[in-house]
Image: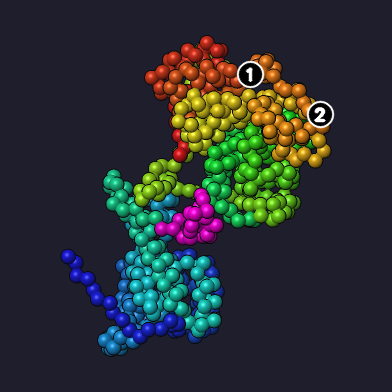
């Protein structure tokens, strides 16, 4: 068993004045201002290389570490701070008789604060540098000083990021030095940074050898607390970023919740990929981490305008992003009640005005016009959540998830479905129009971000039915197929002709139309339903629905995995499906292809499974 050291203690103090600081940073943001503050408090500044040069250029008095230690930098700068006068000054326990005596005997002065960043190893690797250059960017002196300072946090302060400078200044102004509470927090962050840095090196190095990494250290920085997790009893809850990485969104308004942010993460990826794949403005409407609708900007027909309560003239004037959200919201407006929206392009006034009249929790977008932002900030009494996507955000190639004490990791599903995946038509009918390929892409990217098993139906650039989270694939088809029927029947003349009383709210009109189509009222429910109309409508009979649905055609269905039996195709034929897209790969592919041929459908195999959990 390894020998365990006993604690070495000295004089106890909460507030420790700073008389000497060692500064060596690669990220020089704010360092001149911070060093100027320290100098104004009569703190002696030690520094090295480029940092010392920058501070001198700003007019500050700086002592080179080589002059302080009496030992020059050597070995191409590999040895600068690895010296007893540096580490003794950091590690010496203040008020400990033996330490104080030895420091005096060896001429070791106390260093009270270290301000440093580590060499940019990960950035060097990311740029594709050669093995030898990556090795050269492994910091030795920095982590050594970091650990020495953090270990002796009872007396010394370790500062590892520009975002800590302001807090240090405030505490020093108020207290005359740094507090133990601050030093402990900064030490914890420093050790986390050290662990993450060493893990990155170990992962990269073992990867160069073709071996599995012996350890994975992921260090998180808490960003903001959440009211609770999925449920009120799940407290505490918070959002953290990976240390030294940004979050994918910034919060411009409102207070997002746990599920809001899950919706935002999935919804944003969906519209971003739709934009990339189709070149069209895209939108999605999410509820409980699955899309209720998704769409790209395709002009509306007059009948659709009537069904969506927008005049043809107004629809013709809509901007592409507003048009995309109008379509996405009207895929399944009952399920979209209280949605979290995402759009691929800047939110303009048209889009904000559509959102203003809908019941919605929030939105994520790349940017907002000033007018749109003002409209949205007033929604929900100022509580509407507005997120701005971080430009150029890189989530990394590997994603991690903790479940019941296990950590899962996998390569992100970064395949973007495009027209290149729609080339392998396996049915007798093989010709696909540009509009059909677009709908195949819309449906496939939508189900990529839908809880599996999932099946989605698309027409004219929008989802018209999404079936999520069913154990049986044919049940997905039936669930989504019912939504397709509802979408079509909302355009039935009897539905369009419903005469509501003045004052019936928009969402109540939406729900009333859906219940009219479904028709399965209880006696008590029917009384309340009928009270919304100026004239009680005649029932929409099953025969009328069937007759109307006979005209349905041109619908595309996409599945996140192969169809194991032909029953899904049989059911899809009842709701106007003309085109099928799926990964393929089932032993029953031949049977499923024959079923498509029987119904005159075209089917494409993408070769890409899209399970999402």
Mark 2 or mark 1, earlier in chain: 2
Q: Quadrant of residue 408?
A: top left
| Residue 325 visible to an observer of this rendering | yes
Where in the figure is residue 587, as x and y percent of width and height?
38, 19
Q: Residue furthest left?
A: 1
Q: Is residue 224 magenta?
A: yes
State the SS at label 1: loop
Question: Disc number at residue 365?
Answer: none
Q: CA distance from mark 2 to mark 1?
A: 33 Å
Magenta range is 219-245
- Residue at the image point whose x is 48% and y is 54% from the top: 234
- Rate crowding at label 1 as few (under 14), some (14 to 19) or many (20 or more) other CA atoms within 10 Å: some
Residue for badge 1: 553
Residue at x 39%, y 80% (from the top left corner): 155
Q: Percent from the top left, x then y, of residue 46?
A: 42, 78
- Is 594 part of what is drawn in magenta? no
Would you place residue 195 above or below residue 506 in this image?
A: below
Q: Is residue 202 left or right of residue 296?
A: left
Q: Nearer the viewer, residue 200 or 153?
A: 153
Residue at the disc numbered 2: 535
Q: Of residues 474 and 13, which is closer to you in this image?
A: 474
Q: Secondary structure at mark 2?
A: loop
């Amino acid at each position: 068993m390894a020998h365990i050291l006993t604690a070495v203690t000295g004089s106890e103090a909460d507030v420790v004045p700073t008389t000497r600081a060692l500064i060596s940073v690669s990220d020089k943001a704010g360092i001149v201002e911070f060093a100027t503050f320290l100098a104004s408090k009569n703190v002696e500044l030690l520094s090295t290389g480029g940092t010392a040069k920058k501070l001198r250029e700003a007019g500050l008095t700086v002592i080179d570490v080589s002059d302080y230690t009496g030992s020059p930098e050597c070995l191409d700068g590999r040895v600068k701070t690895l010296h007893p006068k540096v580490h003794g000054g950091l590690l010496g326990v203040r008020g400990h008789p033996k330490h104080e005596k030895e420091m005096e005997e060896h001429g070791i002065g106390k260093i009270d604060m270290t301000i440093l960043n580590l060499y940019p190893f990960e950035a060097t690797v990311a740029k594709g540098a050669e093995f030898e250059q990556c090795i050269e960017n492994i910091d030795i002196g920095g982590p050594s000083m970091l650990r020495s300072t953090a270990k002796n946090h009872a007396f010394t302060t370790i500062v590892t990021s520009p975002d800590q400078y302001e807090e240090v200044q405030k505490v020093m102004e108020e207290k005359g030095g740094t507090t133990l509470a601050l030093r402990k927090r900064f030490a914890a962050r420093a050790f986390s940074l050290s662990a993450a840095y060493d893990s990155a090196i170990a992962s990269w190095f073992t990867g160069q050898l073709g071996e599995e990494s012996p350890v994975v250290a992921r260090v998180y920085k808490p960003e903001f607390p959440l009211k609770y997790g999925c449920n009120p009893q799940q407290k505490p809850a918070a959002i953290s970023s990976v240390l030294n990485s940004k979050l994918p969104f910034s919060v411009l308004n409102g207070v997002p919740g746990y599920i809001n942010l899950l919706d935002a993460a999935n919804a944003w990826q969906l519209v971003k990929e739709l934009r990339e794949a189709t070149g069209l403005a895209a939108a999605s409407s999410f509820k409980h981490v699955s899309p209720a609708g998704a769409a790209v900007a395709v002009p509306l027909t007059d009948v659709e305008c009537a069904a969506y309560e927008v005049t043809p003239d107004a629809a013709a004037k809509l901007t592409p992003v507003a048009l995309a959200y109008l379509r996405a919201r009207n895929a399944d407006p009952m399920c979209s009640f209280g949605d979290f929206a995402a759009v691929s392009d800047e939110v303009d006034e048209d889009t904000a005005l559509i959102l203003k009249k809908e019941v919605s929790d929030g939105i994520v977008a790349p940017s907002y016009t000033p007018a749109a932002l003002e409209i949205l900030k007033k929604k929900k009494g100022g509580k509407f959540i507005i997120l701005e996507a971080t430009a150029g955000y890189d989530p990394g190639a590997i994603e991690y998830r903790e479940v019941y004490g296990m950590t899962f990791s996998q390569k992100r599903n970064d395949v973007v479905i495009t027209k290149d995946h729609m080339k392998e038509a396996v049915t007798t009918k093989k010709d696909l129009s540009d509009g059909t390929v677009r709908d195949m892409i819309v449906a496939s990217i939508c189900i990529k971000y839908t809880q599996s098993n999932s099946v989605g139906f698309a027409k004219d650039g929008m989802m018209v039915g999404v079936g999520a989270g069913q154990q049986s694939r044919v049940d997905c088809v039936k669930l989504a197929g019912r939504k397709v029927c509802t979408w079509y029947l909302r355009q039935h003349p009897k539905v369009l002709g419903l005469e509501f009383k003045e004052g019936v709210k928009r969402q109540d009109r939406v729900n009333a139309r859906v219940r009219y189509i479904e028709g399965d009222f209880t006696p008590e429910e029917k009384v309340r339903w009928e009270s919304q109309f100026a004239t009680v409508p005649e029932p929409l009979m099953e025969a009328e629905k069937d007759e109307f649905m006979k005209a349905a055609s041109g619908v595309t269905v996409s599945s996140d995995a192969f169809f194991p039996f032909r029953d899904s195709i049989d059911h899809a034929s009842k709701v106007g499906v003309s085109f099928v897209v799926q990964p393929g790969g089932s032993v029953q592919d031949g049977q499923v292809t024959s079923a498509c041929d029987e119904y005159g459908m075209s089917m494409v195999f993408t070769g890409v499974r899209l399970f999402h959990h």
